[in-house]
Image (cartoon, rainbow, N blue to C red):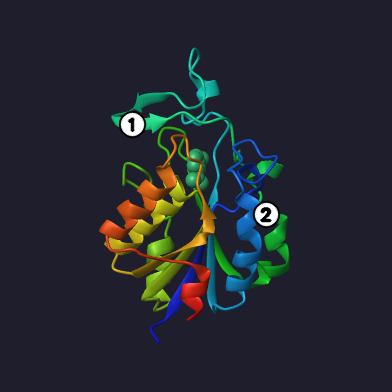
Amino acid sequence: MEKQALILVDIQSDFLPGGALAVPQADAILPIVGQLVEQYKTVVATQDWHPSNHESFAANHPGHKPGDMIELYGLKQVLWPVHCVQNTPGAQLSEALSMHEVRISKVFRKGTDPKVDSYSGFFDNGRRNSTGMGEWLKTQGIKAVSIVGLATDYCVKFTALDAVQLGFQTTVVSDACRAVNLRQGDAERAFNDMRLAGVQVLTSQELAL
Ligand code: VGL
Ligand code: ZN
């Protein structure tokens, strides 16, 4: 078997029930993620980690509200509620992961530049800076990655697309992800975009076969 890693995408309090950008039914992934974490030797996590002046926050654009679309330094940007602000409880990895924390080799933070959002765990949306995750996985000899987490239609999708581009054999575990679904059908469209790019989309049951 080729050397594999599990990537936990943005499993943070603000994306879970009660959080600032709660993803519907996000907590349903936690038991599945907990099982998967025990099955991989190499587990890494991404962490959305914004400064409070981040320009993806609607609050930093007077007259705009969450869900609005703007152009930000040449890139299309959805405006979000204030979320995952550095060193706040909402930015912490879910407590449900704490018992597995020793198994997480490394956490890669993203979204730290106030001028550009970063959906992918590998690069910012302008593809100017790397988080170091791709380089680190390659130095570990990882050839294949399985991806789980939040949210299907943003950070999971763009992490998976970049993983394929970087040459990793890439699987997304569909029932271990949940979508924001700003528009109805966004989750299905995201899975289709991923499949078209060469991502294998499997349920956790199919993965276990
Ligand atoms: C995410 C919106 C804004 C995500 C992060 O983790 O999918 N979505 N920041
Ligand atoms: Zn964010």
Q: Does any atom of ligand 1 lie closer than 8 Å to the CB of label 2?
A: no
Q: Decide: is 127 above or below 65.
A: below
Q: Nearer the viewer, residue 133 or 159?
A: 159
Mark 1, secondary structure of its residue: strand
Q: Decide: is 101 above or below 28.
A: below
Location of residue 31 in the rendering, given as x and y in whole percent from the top left corner: 66, 64
Q: Nearer the viewer, residue 155 or 59?
A: 155
The residue depicted at 32 percent of the width and 46 percent of the height is 128
Q: Does any atom of ligand 1 lie closer than 8 Å to the CB of label 1?
A: no
Mark closer to the chain start, 2 or 1: 1
Location of residue 12 in the rendering, given as x and y in whole percent from the top left corner: 62, 50
Can residue 123 be seen here? no
User: What's the mark number on residue 94?
Assistant: 2
Q: Looking at the picture, which amino acid does disc 2 mark?
A: Ser
Location of residue 93 in the rendering, given as x and y in whole percent from the top left corner: 64, 54
Mark 2, secondary structure of its residue: loop
Distance between mark 2 and mark 1 Cα atoms = 29 Å
Quarter of the N terminus within the rendering: bottom left
Q: Nearer the viewer, residue 23 or 78?
A: 23
Residue under label 1, please give it.
76
Can residue 113 be seen here? yes
Q: Looking at the picture, which amino acid does disc 1 mark?
A: Lys
Location of residue 109 in the rendering, given as x and y in whole percent from the top left corner: 52, 52
The mark total stands at 2
- The furthest residue to the top: 63
As drawn, is 5 to the left or to the right of 59?
left
